[in-house]
Amino acid sequence: MHLLNRITLDPNICHGKPTIRGLRYPVETMLELFSAGMSIEEILDDYEDLERDDLLAVLSYATRLSQVKRIETALAA
């Protein structure tokens, strides 16, 4: 299974935010854990129903989101 297939969007789960396999674990939360310095192994120890590929999918999803061509900034009025 392609890693990005593990990231799901469902308006009935977590208000439509991207989650891991519909398990109500938002991608955002996992990224916050990574940015706080947690390793994949530490996260997996805390969330027993997640798999290593789930967390790799989170990182892959974040990478895709950051691959924008250009970001427009609003001008202050």
Image: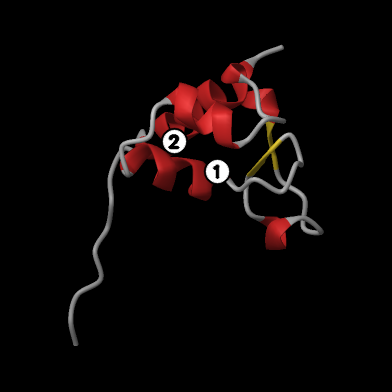
Badge 1 marks a residue whose secondary structure is helix
Q: Amino acid at mark 2?
A: Ala
**Which numbered dot is residue 27?**
1
- What residue do we see at 41% from left, 47% from top? 32
Question: Going by the image, does 77 lie left or right of 40?
Answer: left
The residue at the far bottom in this view is 77
Residue 50 horizontal/vertical position (percent)? 66, 29
Q: In front here: 64 or 53?
A: 53
User: Residue 62 shows which numbered tag?
Assistant: 2
Disc 1 crowd rating (10 Å Cα; few below 14, some 14-19, many 20+) is: many
Q: Quadrant of residue 65?
A: top left
Foreground label between 1 and 2: 1
Near-viewer residue (42 or 67): 42
Toward which corner of the image does residue 76 lie, by quadrant?
A: bottom left
Q: Residue furthest top?
A: 1
Q: In which quadrant will I find the C terminus?
A: bottom left
Q: Position of residue 52 (x, y in %)?
A: 58, 18
Q: How is the image coloured?
A: secondary structure
Image point (38%, 34%), residue name: 38
Of residues 46 and 15, the one nearer the viewer is 46
Q: In the picture shown, does residue 17 fall above or below 44?
A: below
Q: Amino acid at mark 1?
A: Val
- Tell me whether the residue at label 1 lies in contact with that at label 2, contact meaning CB atoms closer than 8 angstroms: yes
> What distance separates the C-alpha of mark 1 from that of mark 2?
8 Å
Mark 1 or mark 2: name the one nearer the start of the chain: 1
Secondary structure of the residue carrying tag 2 is helix
